[in-house]
Image (cartoon, rainbow, N blue to C red):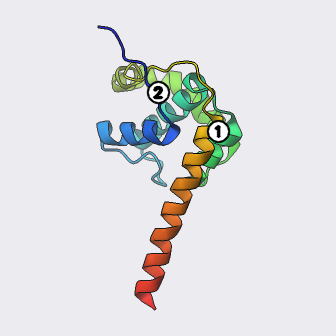
Amino acid sequence: MKLKKYKMTAQEVSDKIIKKTGVDVFENTRRKEVIHYRSLLIYILRERMNLRWTNICLFFKANSRTITHATIIHSHHYYKVYKEENGKLEELEKQFSFEPIDLDTLDKIHMLETKVKNLKKKIEKYEKVT
């Protein structure tokens, strides 16, 4: 089976993981299932999309999930361990194939768009309260 090559953004990767698994990788929890899929996302962003640690942090922040560099590096480091525990991770990882393109600029744009969308939601909630 030949894999399709995608020009995906970080947001599209996270959306695909959430859609395929039903697990919100941005949820603020330590549940094993969430940690595993969050680790997969971080692994893909770093290894397949060549994002810098800082950009990964900014991406999570744009999706309302504050996370430190240390946590991201830890999650990336333990991805291999999680993959051995959870066979679904490797299966899902294989569904992502990328052409070698620079996505830093695209991801910054999408992070900002996501941040604007989240801020609009907060404003709407605030306007409903007042």
Q: Is residue 107 above or below residue 51?
A: below
Q: Which residue is mark 1?
A: 105
Residue 4's image quarter? top left
Q: Is residue 59 above or below residue 99?
A: below
Residue 90 image position (x, y, % from top left):
40, 20
The amino acid beneath tag 1 is Thr
Residue 8 image position (x, y, % from top left):
47, 32
Which is nearer the N-term, disc 1 or disc 2? 2
Q: Which residue is mark 2?
A: 82
Quick check: marks 1 and 2 in contact, CB under 8 Å? no
Q: Residue at x 39, y 18 (%)?
A: 94
Which of labels 1 and 2 is toward the front?
Answer: 1
Q: Is residue 9 above or below residue 111?
A: above
Q: Nearer the viewer, residue 106 or 25?
A: 106
| Label annotation for residue 22 | none
Residue 100 showing in the rendered view? yes
